[in-house]
Structure formats: C-alpha cells, structure tokens
Image: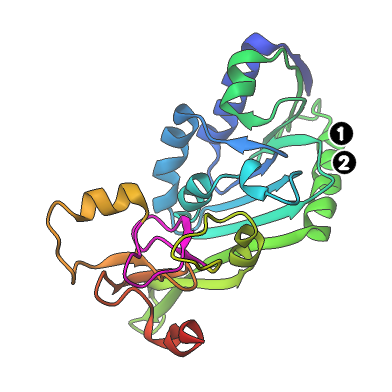
C-alpha cells in the first residue's frame, strides 16, 4: 500500500514508524537534529537488548558536526546495537521499521519539521493480505540498504552476552565496539584548547571535546560533576576512545586501562 503524505501529517507518520518499531529503525537523512519528541520515543528502545538502530547521514564533509551534532551522536550511542554511516553525497531521506517506510523530502531535523513544506510517500507492507503489494517497499528498502552498505562506517557497536546455566539463559556483559571512526571524522572541527588539536570524549556524555585528562568533561557535564566532586564516581565513556566504559572510568581515571599507552602517545 502506498499513500501520499502532506506536510501537516508527515511528522506524525514518522513518529508512528518509530513508535511501532519492535526490532529495528532505519534513519537515512543528510541532516539530523533530533527533536525532543523523537528522543522521547527512542529513549525506551535503548533498553531493548535485541533492538537495532541503523542511521546514515551526509553532507558537510569538512565539518560533519553540522550534519550530526556530537550531542545527538552521544544520544544515539545509548542503543545497544547501533550502526552509524556517513555518505558525503547523500540527499535522499528514508525512515523505516519492520512493516512501514517513508520516502520523503524531510530531514530528521527540528527546523525542517517546524518550518519547511515537505511531503512523503508512505509504503506499508500487508503481511497477511493478498491485496498488499510489497514490491515498491522492497525496492526502496533494497536500494537504501545498498547505499548504506557502500557508505563509510562512523560507528558500530553491539551487545555482548554470555550464556549461563548450560546455555538456557543469557546475561549482558557489556557493549562491543566493532568500529569507531568518529574521532578522526570529528577531529577537524573539534574545539581546540590548551594548545592542543587532539580531541577526546566527555566521560559522562560521550560527546567530542578537547583531549585533556585533567578536564575530561564537557562544560555541562562538569557542572553536574562539580556539585559533588567525587573523583571516583563511575562514568560512562573512555576519554580517549569514546567507547562505553561500563563504569570503569572516572574523573581520577578517565581512560580505560587498555587504552592508556596509546593515549599517552
């Protein structure tokens, strides 16, 4: 089933795709600035160990933070199973879950939702109906997945699990960062301080900041930490690599032990 969507209904239809997703969400948009409503919808899905988010953005090759901000990048890293790709020539927009997709003109950007006149074509699969025509939806999905697979990987991670009790149960033991090129891609535009051009990651939020082991927080995260000033409080990310630290980092130890030698170089 194909349905033309006017601007007034486009935001609601995209939100419905995200709300109704049970296993996967696909986001393809050159420019991304997540509206607060979208974040509220996505937040609960971060807890699902089987849920996967695939996202591709583009443009602004010399400053990709203008296409996907470090703040939104940090938010997305909360998904246990995540693939983020980049394509400098991307202009198309596509949003999908297991049963529904939208090919559209609108970026996943709060400005576009609030100001632009945009349209889209909603494609819905009819799982149990002989009247459903899935050919257009399948063709769109295959095309965008081909583009996704041919684009540059920015970041990929997946949940690590351990089988227990003779394989009857599985226990989460952390996140496995499969590939992380975000540091080199964002480095061109990371703010320079302390006479250093090297970039690091905030150990609380994961956003890109200057590399400085004595100041491993973003400004906002430091304000939060400064209320209690607990140097051993367990944080979320490694200041050097940006990978999840699962509480193994802190203000006093901002870099994972396995990365210490590389960071000092």
- Magenta region: which residues? 199-217
The x and y percentages for residue 241 are 49, 72
Image x and y of residue 259, in percent: 45, 84
- SS at circle 2: helix
Q: Secondary structure at mark 1?
A: helix
Q: Is residue 219 left or right of residue 132?
A: left
Tell me which secondary structure the magenta stretch mostly adopts.
Answer: loop
**Image quadrant where one finds the N terminus:** top right
Residue annotated with mark 1:
136
On the image, numbered disc 2 is attached to which residue?
139
Left or right position of 93 against 188? right
Question: Residue lying farthest front?
Answer: 195
What's the image's color scheme?
Answer: rainbow
Residue lying furthest bottom in this view?
A: 261
Question: Any magenta on residue 53?
Answer: no
Q: Quadrant of residue 6?
A: top right
Numbered label attached to residue 213: none
Residue located at (49% from left, 32% from top): 38
Label 2, residues with CA under 10 Å away: few <14, some 14-19, many ≥20: few
């Amino acid at each position: 089933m194909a349905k033309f969507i006017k601007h007034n209904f486009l935001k609601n239809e995209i939100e419905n795709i995200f709300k109704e997703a049970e296993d996967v969400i696909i986001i393809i948009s050159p420019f991304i600035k997540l509206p607060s409503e979208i974040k509220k919808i996505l937040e609960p899905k971060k807890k699902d160990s089987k849920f996967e988010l695939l996202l591709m953005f583009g443009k602004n090759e010399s400053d990709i933070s203008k296409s996907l901000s470090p703040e939104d990048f940090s938010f997305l890293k909360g998904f246990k199973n995540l693939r983020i790709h980049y394509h400098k020539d991307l202009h198309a927009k596509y949003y999908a879950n297991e049963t529904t997709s939208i090919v559209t003109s609108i970026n996943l950007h709060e400005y576009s939702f609030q100001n632009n006149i945009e349209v889209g074509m909603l494609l819905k699969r009819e799982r149990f109906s002989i009247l459903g025509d899935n050919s257009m939806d399948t063709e769109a999905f295959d095309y965008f997945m081909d583009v996704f697979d041919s684009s540059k990987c920015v970041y990929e991670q997946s949940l690590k699990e351990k089988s227990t009790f003779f394989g009857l149960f599985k226990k989460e033991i952390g996140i496995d960062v499969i590939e992380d090129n975000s540091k080199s891609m964002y480095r061109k535009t990371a703010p320079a301080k302390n006479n250093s051009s090297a970039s690091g990651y905030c150990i609380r939020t994961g956003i890109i900041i200057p590399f400085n082991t004595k100041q491993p927080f973003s400004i906002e995260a430091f304000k939060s930490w400064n209320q209690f000033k607990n140097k051993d409080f367990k944080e979320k990310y490694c200041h050097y690599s940006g990978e999840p630290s699962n509480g193994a980092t802190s203000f006093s130890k901002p870099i994972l032990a396995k990365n210490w030698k590389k960071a000092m170089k």
